[in-house]
Amino acid sequence: MTSTCIVFEDTLVEQLRPINLARSTSSITCGAFCLEELISVWPQTLAYHLRPHLRPIAKRAGKTLTGAIEGPIGYLNAAVVPDLATIDRIAELFAKGEPFLALSDQRITAALAPGAFPEALADKPIGELVAHLLDQRLPIIDDEFATFERTFDVMSHHERLLRGHLDRLMRRGVGKEISKDIVVGEGADIADNVVLDASGGPIVIGKNVRIMPFSYVLGPVRIGDDCRIIDHASIKHGTVLGHTVKAGGELEETIIEPYSNKQHHGFLGHSYIGSWVNLGAGTSNSDLKNTYGEIAISDAANRSVPTGRQFLGCVIGDYTKTAINTSIFTGKLIGLASFLYGFISTNVPSFTNYARSFGQVTEVSVDVAVKTQQRAASRRKVEVTDIDRQFMRDLFEMTQPERQLSSEQLVL
């Protein structure tokens, strides 16, 4: 058995922007878990080889490589989908102890290598770790493990995985089962007239959650610790809320990462929302075209990419805020630390004041972004350190090429 597992990013993770701009690809929630949560129970020591801008944050959390590691070493691609069967199979291969290399469409997904991890590789670009593995000429196995390749893959796998994830959570004893398929954590406060409907799937409610009167929760749903559900909310099937989220209005098939707010009226469906996002009152998104046709997204090169999906909402990167009554069209990718107003009919770069329907698109200065985050964090009693401030400045610099809007056309 290997005693160390290195979770690594490869160059293909750039296709997942903006979801993973401010987080490791392994911490993208899909279903009820992210990959990091599922492998946290492994006996191996976990180390992370990430894109350079993420390394100071990872180092602070004790999730980085600090030097050479003796073999044998397990390797796991951070973009591997957190499928329970996949994770159990990779754990089995690591325990078996025989060298292997697993591929999916020529992308390395997992490996066990007898050789040591050289100290010099710790500070190298992410692609060099892949080259290091290929150089060892490990025996290729038949197992193919799915990975996230595009942003919309997260929503597609989310719908497939959620019920199984919730079943495993309930078996872990994360709370008290108050009714069939409804588990509630310690300290939760649920108003008497709240309707918890598990006819469509399990409902798992975390610790210290407050659900205010006249709310409706239709499983499968996971509500993380310390969340607050506003009165008259409709939290429908497929919704997963990270810890310390405020939610209201109507949500369906949507992932909201920790510390984000969507507590007013408005619809959010088939969408992924990063951390520290605030959606103003009346903000809604479309997740279905008027023609009922397949939704396509525009990639970084402004090419249309078919998703194979009839329902697809929006992706909103970390730290972004919307004004009241903001309306977001189907399949839009919205960068991090942007401010949105009016109709959002195109993708939005990071660090952008987007009021295109009013004839204004400007850059958000990094100083404004830092100050805004400091104010938002203080409301949750979270400290913003020099590392966090520098992280925001690094994100601003690396997303500068996105903010080229002169040739962009309004499209539906």
Image (cartoon, helix red, strand yellow):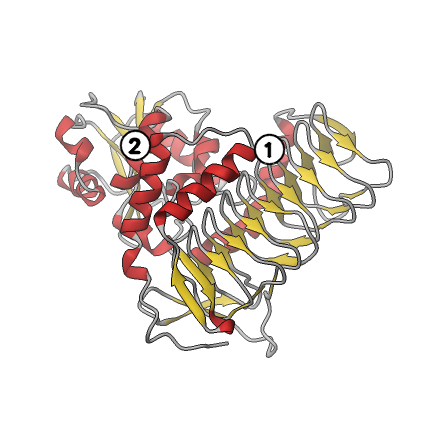
Which residue sits at x=72%, y=30%?
184
Please name the residue that numbered disc 2 is placed on: 56
For residue 167, which quarter of the picture? top right
Which element carries disc 1, helix, strand or loop? helix
Nearest the camera: 77 or 362? 362
Give me the C-alpha separation between circle 1 and circle 2.
33 Å
Nearest the camera: 252 or 56? 56
Q: Amino acid at mark 2?
A: Pro
Which residue sits at x=17%, y=25%?
116
Which residue sits at x=43%, y=62%?
348
Q: Classify mark 2: residues with Cα within 10 Å, few (<14), some (14-19) or many (20+).
A: some
* Between discs 1 and 2, the one toward the N terminus: 2
Q: Classify mark 1: residues with Cα within 10 Å, few (<14), some (14-19) or many (20+).
A: few
Total marks in image: 2
Which element carries disc 2, helix, strand or loop? helix
Residue 212 lies left or right of residue 281; in this view the side is right
State the image coordinates of residue 190 (x, y, percent, origin top left).
Answer: 78, 34
State the image coordinates of residue 197 (x, y, percent, origin top left).
Answer: 78, 45
Nearest the camera: 135 or 122? 122
Quadrant, the N terminus: top left
State the image coordinates of residue 337 (x, y, percent, origin top left).
Answer: 43, 50
Please name the residue that numbered disc 1 is placed on: 168
Q: Does residue 47 appear in this view?
A: no
Q: Amino acid at mark 1?
A: Arg
Q: Does residue 113 appear in this view?
A: yes
Nearest the camera: 172 or 365? 365
